[in-house]
Each structure stands twice: as structure tokens, then as C-alpha cells.
Image (cartoon, coloured by chain):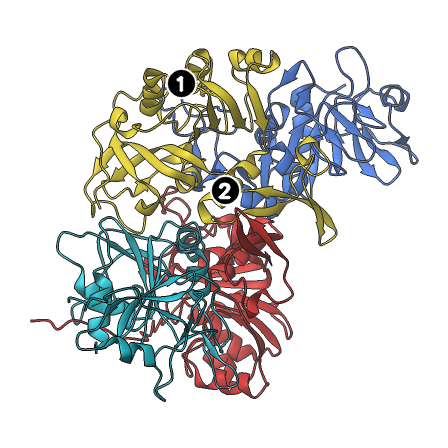
Chain colours: A yellow, B red, C cyan, D blue
Amino acid sequence: MNKKVANAEEACKGIENGMTLMLGGFGLCGIPENSISELVNLNVKELTCISNNAGVDDFGLGLLLQKKQIKKMISSYVGENDEFERQMLSGELEVDLIPQGSLAERCRAGGAGIPAFFTPAGYGTEVAEGKEVREFNGKPHILESALTADFAIVKAWKGDTAGNLVFKGTARNFNPMMAMAGTITIAEVEELVEPGELNPNEIHTAGIFVQRIFQGTGYEKRIEQRTVRPKN
Amino acid sequence: MNKKVANAEEACKGIENGMTLMLGGFGLCGIPENSISELVNLNVKELTCISNNAGVDDFGLGLLLQKKQIKKMISSYVGENDEFERQMLSGELEVDLIPQGSLAERCRAGGAGIPAFFTPAGYGTEVAEGKEVREFNGKPHILESALTADFAIVKAWKGDTAGNLVFKGTARNFNPMMAMAGTITIAEVEELVEPGELNPNEIHTAGIFVQRIFQGTGYEKRIEQRTVRPKN
Amino acid sequence: MLSKTQIAQRIAQELQNGWYVNLGIGIPTLVANYIPKGIEVEFQSENGILGMGPFPIEGTEDADLINAGKQTITALPGAVYFDSATSFAMIRGQHVQLTVLGGMEVSETGDIANWKIPGKMVKGMGGAMDLVASADNIIVAMMHTNRAGESKLLKKCSLPLTGVACVKKIVTNLAVLEIVEAGFKLIERAPGVSVEEIKNATEGNLIIDGEIPEMVL
Amino acid sequence: MLSKTQIAQRIAQELQNGWYVNLGIGIPTLVANYIPKGIEVEFQSENGILGMGPFPIEGTEDADLINAGKQTITALPGAVYFDSATSFAMIRGQHVQLTVLGGMEVSETGDIANWKIPGKMVKGMGGAMDLVASADNIIVAMMHTNRAGESKLLKKCSLPLTGVACVKKIVTNLAVLEIVEAGFKLIERAPGVSVEEIKNATEGNLIIDGEIPEMVL
């Protein structure tokens, strides 16, 4: 089952104006850099982007915000991006803010054929507005629905041509759930190997969830907050 | 965070008559053999056991059935056990049969603080009786609730004293979800190592879900259906 | 009339390149032996493997590597193991393109019963209810009639249901049929089996539209 | 009056052996520096690590290893990485024994607001709503008053809520307080701070029951 494509250009074929995209990553950690560049090249507009964060001004999804390619963001935290805040407060950008755990679970639910589930997160807040409330074990919960996307775009450390993925460290984050929830899922990886080279016991995302895979190039992997102890 | 206990005897302390237990495994694959033996020794009765299967007549949960320690089984498939069928048809044993995917998801939900979710599985069947039905995307779904247990007992291949677990092959099955759903989770492993010896990127179940861990002995790992090709 | 093996062989013709396929216990398992040339599919077993291979060579069997029928198996290159929740996320989330399973009864509206005979046999539904409620493409492999000679293709199932309006296609020892709005549409006859014989063996509404070709194995 | 560091130091006294702890951004992060002797705890960061260690030694930082504040970190022996769904399964499923987070406002009924100032600042709630809705044990670390000198311990929050009736304890620069049925129960005073000063800085109902000890750091 060979899902290998040559590069981001080939992987992103079919992404059109007005589509809903999921993009993996937490902050700038584990984001699909190559595919984001290609989205900028393609200049697709009116996108709805589901991503935990919105990048920074000049990296990650911030690049799409600069070019006003995004109509709506569905995120949990967007605090690192001035252009985002400007577009949101001015009303240019629609924003749906979701508790992080609900965002993760809603993506998983989308991929897992679970249309809705109850969670305590957000009860009694803006997030609960218009949502069904039900008590379980004496505690109020709200009903949250599944999220899916036309394309899910994820970044892994290693992958094989059958689409199996292994993530590294905390770069895993939202990538596995989003991989499950895309009608077409694109995976870009730092190292693409042949089937059989990954240990089947150590694969984080099964190839069944991935439709296209390619080995990316020139990963910058920018660090947002470089915090260190002195060498001495 | 040292969760190591000496053996099954120490691990099973506190398991009492009338409790609800979850037991990992699929058929006889990945079952907590040492702990099951200890449950037989303890002769605790009136148990509610949540387990995908009920073992065979003389192995796995079949050992508890023989001694009539089980009041109620919550399972998805129980076809390999004559004593089970006898007790069920005679009414000695209460049985709640649940679609396998719903069973897995209900255990996960129990561990993940999700009290209920919608699934299409079982709609229009006995399983749906008394359950809320709701349509999503034109398809009827039923509301299923979370499962939890006083003790969850799982079997892993390797583990460290912090409770981190690695499973092998298809012996993973229900073990990870059940580990999440126990008030106290006992893990028995074939090989117990020190923290740091397992690669943090390759751990299947995080230690946070495990309260007690021990290295089991004398694993029989019986094969139910030995199907082979000739050597030649 | 087809043997069980031939039923599997005929079903294998339905496989399409790139499909993930879940094969149930019994006849469905045999489908894996007849994958058409040039077609690449991957087999999922709901207990937690994708990329299931043939039975192991004698002496290499591993108790930690079984399929949903509890048989020892092997893993092909590119295989992956996962837990039961993830397995059914694949199934419920419609990432598996084809499910083949056995049936005790199928109704003309696509209902299926295959898990329980009240008072007699209760093995449990295993993963069948999840599979039939989720898969877009479900093929039932079964005998056209039971041992008493009674039709298993009914107006209405008499046994407790496994799923409602879910079966798309049925391959029996006598015929290939599709579930359409009006009932069982006859698609192909087994070699040497007449339309009349199929009619007689089918209790539910049988739709015969023009000449019915004989299947080619 | 306590410095931010001292607030963290006081909160660290609440840690109990064997706890899994989630520390929010800001003051809460500092708590990790003051774990009492003989107490072993493990830190969870909701972006996907358990067993978080100190910042890396200069030159060893790894872009693929950060905490929820996007800071480079290290992993201790016994650490484990996981995805965001699993991370919040830990949180929502109450496997994390203590959550420490910052607050903009806390009400006398335990409501908390810390994610949004309408029309002015909208960073998003991140994981805070999941954390406060789930944790059994929530400590808020914050200044007792805002920059304008107005109390942040209110009868009712004025800002959009993060969670309802969830805060258990508050450690400010002036005091340690518990949320009880009738309001903010004063437990300890910061060194050199009088009950009167705390009273003046607290808009919500303050419960003073007997002699209030000075905290010991």
C-alpha cells in the first residue's frame, strides 16, 4: 500500500478555497512546515483551519494569516500572534476557541466515528452556550461534537510508505488525532523508510489513517521559548 | 514514584467480595495470569468482571467461573467456554454482552472522564434497549456510558517501577484502556525494569494510570487456536 | 453450487486496490487466500493488527500474535499493532473499506442476525455490531439455506439482530445478490444453479432483472 | 507580602508524596523549584509529557521537547510522551492530583476567570477549562489585587469564566485562603501582613475564624 508522494506540492493537490483543514502541532512544535509553505504558495483562501495554535507572526500558520488566507480559526490558544489578535478583534477573522482537551477529543471523535460525547470542560462558561447540559454522577457536563476536515496535515518524525508514523517527544501532540480525522490525511516526515523498517509495536499512528506521505526538507523547527540552564 | 510490589499477592490486596474488576486480554492473549491465580487463591466471590472474553474452561477467567466467584460478566464474546454457557443459560451467572468496540470505548471513556458518548454500534438491536437514540448526519446512534472498576488488572510485556507499560503484539488489546479505568490499576509484567530503561517515546501506557506493578512468574501464555503452515 | 472455498474465492473478486479489509471468522477468513493479481489490500483484525499475514511456519507461532479468531498469525512488513479502542476507531470511523462476515439470517432490507439463538446459543456479538453499524461496504458470506433447507434470505430476520439495514451484498453457495430498495437483487448465479433454484431457496423478495449471468471463478 | 517566588514556595508545601501535578504558566511553573525534601511528585505538561525535568543545559535544547508554555525542557528517567487526547484523558479522568494555575479573578464560590478580557485580550483558554473542570484539587496562584489595587477575590467574577465552583485554595501575595461554603476562609497571613490588610484587599466574603497564623516559608 504505497502512499508515497514526491513532495508537499504533490501532497497538497486538491486543497481548494473554502476547505476545512486540520494542522497538527502545539505552538511551533511538530507543525507540518513543508505543507504550510505549500499552502502559502497555492494561495488558497477562505480556509477554516483547525489547529491548537495559530503559529507566530512570521512562522507556522502565521504565514497564512499574513496573507489573509484564513477565514476561520478553530483553536484553543492563540496568544503568541499579534496579527491574529488584530484580525480577530477587527472582525476580519472568525475565531472559535475551544478547551484544549475538548479540541483533542473532538478530533479523535471525528476520526473514530463518535459523533458526540459529554465532557465537564467549559460547563458554566461561554463555551457551553447553546450546548446541551446533562448531569452525570452529580456533575454537569456539556455535549461536544466531533470535528473532521477535508484535509488533515500532520508532521511526524519517521514514517514508512504505508503511512505508518512515529512521532518524537512532545512533537506528537495533536498530530495523531488529526491524522484520524481527515478525509484525506497528508503526513510529512523527517525520514521516510520502507515498510518493515519501523517496529510494528512502536508505531504511533497506523497507516490506515494516512493517504499521502512524503519526506519533507529543510525543517527549521523554530523554538518559541528557548529556556536553558547555564553550562558551567 | 515507585509502584513496585513483590508479587500478585501483594498486588491484589484490598480486592473484596462484590467488587467490580476489569481484566485485560483478548481470548487468552495478554491476560494477567498471575493475578487471576491470586484471585482464585483469595476466593473472592460475587465479582463483576469486565473482560472481553471469559477465558476457556480451565484457563483465564474460566478458573474463576469454575469456582463460581463471578456474579456478573460484562463481555463481548464468550464462545469458548462451556461452563460459562451453562451458568449463563441456567441463570446462575448474569451476563451483559456489549459490542466489542463499545466495550473498548466505554473503558477508555471511564478512564478519560467522559461519562457518555454516541456510537452507531448496536442501534436497532437488543443492545440499544433502554438507551437514548439520536441521529447524527442522518444516521441513528445510541448513547453509551463509561465503565470503571474498583480494580483494573492488566498484563504487559515490559514495565518500569514508575508504572510505565509496553505491550507486545496483539497482547495489547484491551489492556491500555482498562489500565485507565481502574480506581486501582494493577499491572503484571514479564520484565520489570528501572525508570529510564524504557524509551519514553515507545511507552504504550503511562505510569500515571498504574498504581501497583510487579514482575509475574511462570507465564503459560496458552494458545487457543494453534494454526500453522508446514515447515518444509 | 459453490463450496465454502469458492464463496471466498468469489468474494475476493470484490477486492479493490488499496482497500483495508476486515475478515470475519469462518468463510470470510478464506478470502485472504484468493486476492486477485495486481490487487493490494491490507487485512485488519479487530483485536489489534493491521497488515496481518498468513499463519506462522510451524514452530514460530507466538502466543502474543493472534487474530480475532484467536488463531496464531504473522505480521507482514508494514504491519502495526494497536489497542482495541484504536482498532474500533478505525472501524467506526470508516477507515476500513470492506467488511466480510458470516450470517445466520439476512433480511431483504439488509438487516443481519449472526450472534445469538435465544435460549440455545449465546456466544456474544464480538466486534460484529460495530463492524456492521459502521462499514460502508459489507459483504455477507453464508450458505443460502440452513441445514433444514430453510432460506436464510428472509423478508424479516427471526433471530436477534446484529445490525439494521447495513448489508450491501451477499455471496452464498447459490448466488451473488445485492440489497436494493425492493429486496434481494440477483446479480450472478453459481455455476450450474438455475434462477428457479435460487428463487426456491430465497424467502425474501428476489428481484430478477433480465438475464442473470453465471459467475466466473 | 510574598514575592511571586515565595507564592510558589508556599504552594510547594501543599505537595504530597506520589502526586501527579500540572503546573500552569507563570508563578505555578516556579513551584517545581521548591519541592519539599522527601516528597516525590511527577509533573505533567498537557502538551504531552509526564516526568518533566528542569530546563536543558545550554546547547542541548530540543525543539521537539517543550512544555505547555512552549519552553524547552528535559525529561527525567521514567518520563513518557503521549498525544493530546491521552494527555487530557489523564486530566479529565482525574489521574492528576493537583493543578496549580494563575487567575485573573476568583469568586467566593470558587469560580475562576483567567482567559479573556472582552474586547481587549483574547488568548484562548488553552487547557485551563479542562483542568479546572476536572481536577479535584485546584490551587490558584495570583496577586491578591490587580495593578489598580482592586481586589481579585470577588463576590462574583466580572470576566468570562474559565470554570465554575472549582477552586479549592488560593495562595496570593497576602494570604492563603480556602473556598468554603460561605466564602474565602482565611488560613494564613503572609509574613508581616495583617488581617486588616487582607480584609481591605478582599471584595468577596472573607471568613476569619479565630487567630490567623503567619505562614512559615
Q: Secondary structure at mark 2?
A: helix
Indicate left or right for A120 with B117 as reference: right
Does B137 appear above or below C175? above
Q: Which amino acid is tagged 1?
A: Asn
Q: Identify the chain of the residue marked 1, using the numbered disc in the image.
A: A
Which numbered disc covers residue A232?
1
Q: Which mark is residue A71?
A: none
Q: Amino acid at mark 2?
A: Ala
Q: Is residue A127 above or below residue C46?
A: above
Taking C68 as reference, is D83 above or below it?
A: above
Q: Secondary structure at mark 1?
A: loop
Front-most of residues B42 and D128: D128
Residue reaching furthest right? D210
Mark 2 vs mark 1: in front: 2
**Point 18% across, 60% down: residue:** C35
Report x, y in % for residue A11. Answer: 28, 30
Q: Where is the C terminus of chain A found, in terms of image quarters?
A: top left
- Residue D142 falls in which quadrant of the image? top right
Q: Residue furthest left?
A: B232
Q: Residue at x 57, y 23 (%)?
A: A95
Question: For mark 2, does the 10 Å Cα neighbourhood hold few (<14), some (14 to 19), or many (20 or more) residues?
Answer: many
Q: Residue at x 89, y 30 (%)?
A: D205
Residue B211 in sight here: no
Number of the label disc, if any, that sits on residue D85 = 2
Q: Residue at x 37, y 49 (%)?
A: C95
Decide which of D62, C125 is in the foreground and name it.
C125
Horizontal and vertical percent position of residue A139: 72, 48
